[in-house]
Image (cartoon, rainbow, N blue to C red):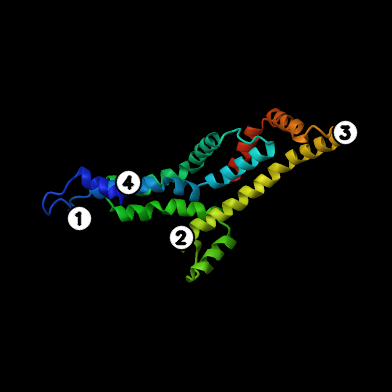
Amino acid sequence: MSGLLLVLVARPPSGMNGLNLGTNNQVPWTIVFTLTLLTLVPAILLSMTPMVRLLVVFHFLRQALGTQTAPSNQVLMGLGLMMTWFLMQPVLVQVDQQAVEPYRQGQISGWEAIERGAGPPKAYMLHYAREKDLALFVSASMTTRPGKPDDLPMRVVVPAYMLSELKAGFAIGAVLFLPFLLVDMVVASITTSIGMYQLPPVVISTPLKILLFVMVDGWNLLAGSLLKSF
């Protein structure tokens, strides 16, 4: 609605020709569609890309290290965004070749460009969505079970993909948490055995965990493991 108001303000109607909805006046509707799409970009990034898994793992890592605000949310979001761009580059190239470029040249309409552009992201999500999650939303939507996964609608594929990514992120985060939990247990047992009851074990274990993570080049190992998981 706000995009439509901006269009009307920028191009005030003159008589009956001001709001021509025919094919000869497509610029205002292109602006409306672009502004609407921009408002949906954050939701698209979090629901149709690997960013869900990346952010879950990054936050698990921060909790395991015991650093509450380092790295900050902005840093983790930026790293997740750049890695998402890297991983989704082949999909974006397919969307550009199949939908964006033909639409620019006027070979296809806007709706046909949307249908073609949804193909590569849908194939990507189906590759990582678990069959169990897909079956859950197919059953909940009360639709006929399709003959092949490609026939599933996006309203089934997107939430199933998000559930699959959340499970994968939590599984990686749990494995990532174990070595740091072991350090906490060792430090707590040592401090308790020597009678250091006044000093919280986390004061000693946090620097040790950070030092261990730096010595093994943890960020490089984590990024490599995440990239190999796709």
Looking at the image, which residue is at 18% across and 53% down?
Answer: 19
Q: Which amino acid does label 2 sit on?
A: Arg
Image height of 114 relative to 146, above or below: above
Q: Could you tell whether 12 is left or right of 46 in the image?
A: left
Q: Residue at x 30, y 48 (%)?
A: 2
Q: In this view, does 136 lie to the left or right of 29?
A: right
* CB under 8 Å between discs 4 and 1: no
Q: Distance between the residues labelled 3 and 2?
A: 58 Å
Among numbered discs 3 and 2, the one appearing first in the sequence? 2
Q: Which amino acid does label 4 sit on?
A: Thr
- SS at mark 1 in the image: loop
Front residue of 65 and 161: 65
Q: Which of the two labelled residues, at mark 4 and mark 1, occupies the earlier sequence position?
A: 1
**Which residue does the numbered mark 1 point to in the structure image?**
21
- From what the image shows, is residue 108 above or below residue 141? above
The mark that comes first in sequence, 3 or 1, is 1
Q: What residue type is labelled 3?
A: Gly
Q: How far apart are marks 4 and 1 (CA)?
A: 17 Å
Circle 3 packing at 10 Å, graded few (<14), some (14-19), many (20+), is few
Q: Name the residue under label 2.
A: 155
Disc 2 packing (10 Å; few <14; some 14–19; many ≥20): few
- Mark 3 vs mark 1, foreground winner is 3
Mark sitting earlier along the chain (2/1):
1
Residue 176 point in image, percent of width and height: 69, 42
Q: Name the residue under label 3.
A: 195
Comparing marks 4 and 3, which lies closer to the viewer? 3
Mark 4 or mark 3: which comes first in sequence?
Answer: 4
The amino acid type, in three-letter code, at marker 1 is Leu
Q: Name the residue under label 4.
A: 34
Looking at the picture, how far across and down is residue 111, in whole percent? 31, 55
Q: So how many labels did they put on this image?
A: 4
